[in-house]
Image (tube, rainbow, N blue to C red):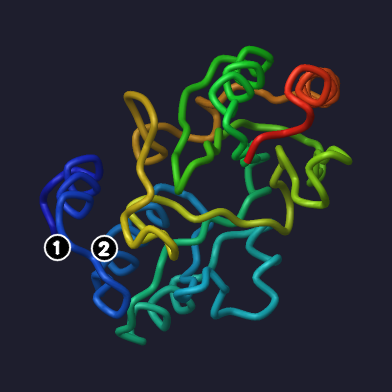
Amino acid sequence: ESSIGLDQFCQTVKNSNVFEGEVLSNIFSIWGRKFYESGYSVMPVIAKNQPIESGFQRFSKALPTEDEFQRWENLNNSFNIGLVLGLNNLVCLDIDYDGEDRDAFLDGVKALCPPIVVAKKGKKGLSIFFRGKMGGKKMTHSSYGKKPLVEVLSVGNYTILPPSIHVDTKKPYSWEGQTDLLNVTPEDLPWLTDADVLNIEIFISDFMREDEQTRGGRNI
């Protein structure tokens, strides 16, 4: 078992050449086990971030059993780590706007959030972890098509955890900030409220309307 920390491991992989077919085979067996033993409902996902387990939504209500987890480990395959949301009120606010003005958009959404304790980055977006009792919600805008700009992932949803390898960049997801989920418990995370979500929806509407007026529509 690796003795280096998660941040150091992510940085080591990021600085190496990781190509399709060469994904590190021990990511789930080492780091998935650490998340599981810390009380997080994790499961293996394959290259296209598809769960290998049917009916995974049950892990929003209870952790996988030790027998299930050992069965996954014994498959000896290259899996990413999927975190199933909902258990212990864990939710994830996934910000995925990729316009040229995405930094301003990201700053605007973050300003409306409770204090941010743990967040992760993938290709371009940012995912922030909170506690919450709301269901999943996709926040869209007509000028952006059907793709959500921001999404609340909750019961029955999952997100990919560092140091999993991103399917497009072939580099690891990374933590944003000073800590990660292995160093906190869900009880350490602030609550995301329905009022917070409503304020974010209002911001999205105003931001995208201004974007259309001042720049002739979104810039991708």
- Secondary structure, mark 2, is helix
- The extreme front residue here reads 216
Q: Which mark is residue 30?
A: 2
Q: Position of residue 78 (x, y in %)?
A: 33, 77
Category of crowding for the residue at label 2, using alpha-carbon neighbours closer than 10 angstroms: few (below 14), some (14–19), many (at least 20): few
Provide residue 41's location: percent of width, then percent of height. Answer: 53, 56
Residue 122 visible, this angle:
yes
The earlier-in-sequence mark between 2 and 1 is 1
Q: Residue furthest bottom?
A: 75
Q: Residue at x 67, y 23 (%)?
A: 191
27 horizontally vs 155: left or right? left
How many numbered markers are drawn? 2
Q: Residue at x 65, y 16 (%)?
A: 108
The answer to whether residue 195 of the structure is visible from this angle is: no
Residue under pointer 1: 1
Residue 176: name its quadrant: top left
Residue placed at 83% from the left, 19% from the top?
213
Q: Is residue 10 left or right of residue 15?
A: right
Distance CA(mark 2)–CA(mark 1): 7 Å
Amino acid identity at mark 1: Glu
Classify residue 141 as left or right of residue 15: right
Task: In this rendered view, identify the residue nearer to me: 158 or 60.
Answer: 158
**Percent coordinates x, y for residue 64 in the rendering:** 54, 67
| Image quarter in which the C terminus is found | top right
Q: Amino acid at mark 2?
A: Ile
Kindly indicate whether the residue at mark 1 contacts the one at mark 2 (C-beta within 8 angstroms).
Answer: yes
| SS of the residue under disc 1 | loop
Q: Quadrant of residue 81?
A: bottom left
The residue sitting at 76% across, 17% down in the picture is 214
- For the N terminus, give its image quadrant: bottom left
Q: Is residue 192 above or below residue 32?
A: above
Towards the viewer: 213 or 41 = 213
